[in-house]
Amino acid sequence: MSMLSVFFIGVGLSMDACAVSFAKGMCLKEKAKRYAVLLGFAFGLFQAGMPLLGWWIGHYFEGFITVIDHWIAFVLLGAIGYHMIQEAKENEIETINHTSHIPLKDIIVLAIATSIDALAVGISFAFLQVDILTAILLIGSTTFVISFAAVIIGNRCGGYLGKYAEIIGGIILIAIGLKILIEHLLS
């Protein structure tokens, strides 16, 4: 497999992280660049780590992982999206419902949820004899750049959306989880 193909796989894998980064960026009142780096790093790290883990344990768990990966992503993204919507409703008194903080546990859960598909890609890398070190560096750095940019762009758009930014972000996360679930159930 060529590195160009691996790059396009990295772009494809980073799309969920991109959407989540955009949604989180919409909700940030301040520290957007700080969280762009943090989210980009976390998403890039997990997008690189999951293929490595998948490559490493490839043939042992292939059937098990591909059977439940979509359910795990659906539940994690759905729960975080629901939490965002509930938080926005609880704070309806405020005219603008933005946050200055994204808890580390939320960042880690989102990074795991958006990188589960990469685990299956890593399993396929084991069978395709891909240079795993180059592949994970390429996937991780691609995801970092895309996620970083998405937070910044989302932050700029979030100001226009006002108090609805967190609700929209929650809906986006639930929609991504649902999309992952439907794609896997229909394939």
Image (cartoon, rainbow, N blue to C red):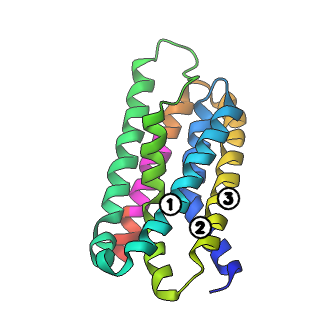
Where's residue 180, x and y in %? 42, 62
Q: CA distance from mark 2 to mark 3?
A: 8 Å
- Give coordinates of residue 168: x percent, y percent: 52, 38
Amino acid under label 2? Ile
124 to 27, vertically: above or below: below
Q: Residues within 10 Å of mark 1 (few under 14, many from 20)?
A: many
User: Quarter holding the C terminus?
Assistant: bottom left
Where residue 7 sits, quadrant-wise, is: bottom right
Q: Residue at x 68, y 61 (%)?
A: 142
Q: Is 3 or 77 nearer to us in this picture? A: 3
Asked whether residue 118 is in view, the answer is no
User: Of callouts 1 and 3, which one flags the residue occurring earlier in the amino acid sequence?
Assistant: 1
Residue located beneath label 1 in the image: 49
**Secondary structure beneath disc 1?**
helix
Image spot of residue 64 (x, y percent): 27, 72
Labels 2 and 1: the sequence-earlier one: 1
How far is the residue under mark 1 from the one under mark 3?
12 Å
Does the CB distance between marks 2 and 1 fall below 8 Å?
Answer: yes
Label 3 sits on what residue type?
A: Ser
The answer to the question of whether label 1 and label 3 lie on touching residues, with beta carbons closer than 8 A, is no
The magenta segment is: 170-180
* Residue bearing mark 3: 141
